[in-house]
Image (spheres, grey):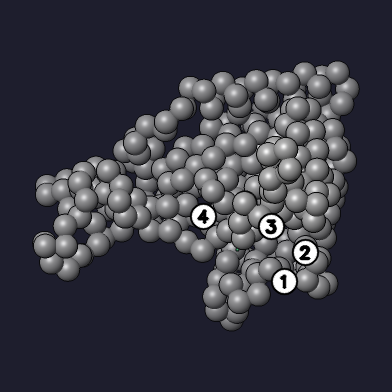
Amino acid sequence: MDSKKGSKAPGSPDVEYFFNSAPPLKGRVQTSQKLKEFVEKIVRSSESGRPIRVVCVTSGGTTVPLEQRCVRYIDNFSSGYRGATSTEYSCFFYKNGCVSIIFSNFRGSCQPYCRYLPHDSFLELFDIAEDSTIKVCESHDTVVKRSIKDYRKAVEEGLLLKIPFTTIFEYLQILQMVATSMNCLKSLGMFYLAAAVSDFYVPWENMVEHKIQSTEGPLDMRLTQVPKMLSVLRKDWAPSAFCISFKLETDPDILLQKADMAMQKYSMHIVVANELANYKKEVTVVTSRGKTKVCSHGKDHDLEAELVDLLVDRHFEHIKKCGSEANGA
Ligand code: PAZ
């Protein structure tokens, strides 16, 4: 949207422009410190003979603010279920203790270890006992205990670090920080980029400060293309990490072709292709070796179980391959 007269929108997508013109990330110093401590702890464990894999899972949508003092924004449909569920399965398939997850998620989207809790109302979880204390309803007792236990274990053992974002500016600044912190882990790092990231945005300097007024008539918007950060992640931020991106389309006729293109263009190791109409029931794992369909087998079965199992195997192969390359094999 060209609402600030005289300011120049960049003619082409540009990574440097994006980062230089983005509003500073709130809490950058604290986030960077937390990341540093998290990764250092992992490196220490790896040095003492217990190689730990680190998976950065991105999850949920991103918003594109339309005003600097944001009242309105562009959003998307992503619930964060895939990222949250995959986080839990990753802990399972790598075997607890052998993987740490950096879970970067859209604020308010699904969280790991919460998927068995009721979605409708938080208040339905609780009852007031006769002595006026609050207790969990008997019907939810088992799932609540299990969620608390699994979640606390993951956090206390340093296996889960959550870094939330809301806007596209925050998402990409955080991804850059996480990726550069994980670079030292080389092939032990994996990126599982399930977040639905906006392809278009309004550069901060072109954005009006105050709420857009309807009295000014119809709204003409010009959105700039978000630079393709996947290439930067692969080439500069964490070149040895194992990278999986997701591709969502609504038109089944172009889905696999777009996934192939994404794999080649951004040098992804794997692209997981899914179609909006059935993304909870079926995905296609696209690799240079071919395509594999992964399906859900019913209402109570998450396809993420098979998906993560397959991806963990591929990550181990990648680690092995990088190890033999480093040893000149
Ligand atoms: O978050 P969710 O479980 O509702 O949806 C997951 C998904 C469809 C956003 C994910 O599988 C995906 O395809 N992410 C990438 C979307 C894209 O930018 O193409």
Q: Residue 282 carries which label?
A: 1
Q: Which of the 4 image quadrants contains residue 38?
A: top right
**Mark 1: which secondary structure?**
strand
Q: Distance between the residues labelled 3 and 2?
A: 20 Å
Q: Nearer the viewer, mark 3 or mark 4?
A: 3
Q: Does the residue labelled 4 lie within 8 Å of ligand 1?
A: yes
Disc 2 residue lies near ligand 1 with CB under 8 A: no
Mark 1 in CB contact with mark 2 (< 8 angstroms): yes
Q: Distance between the residues labelled 1 and 4?
A: 20 Å
| Up-down relation of residue 119 to residue 210 (above or below) | below
Of label 3 and label 4, which has the lower sequence position?
Answer: 4
Q: Which residue is drawn at 67% across and 62% down?
A: 272
Q: Is residue 184 left or right of residue 198?
A: right
- Is 255 located above or below residue 224 in the figure? below
- How busy is the neighbourhood of tag 2: few (under 14 within 10 Å), some, or many (20 plus)? many
Marks 1 and 2 sit apart, C-alpha to C-alpha, by: 7 Å
Task: Name the amino acid type tagged 4.
Answer: Gly
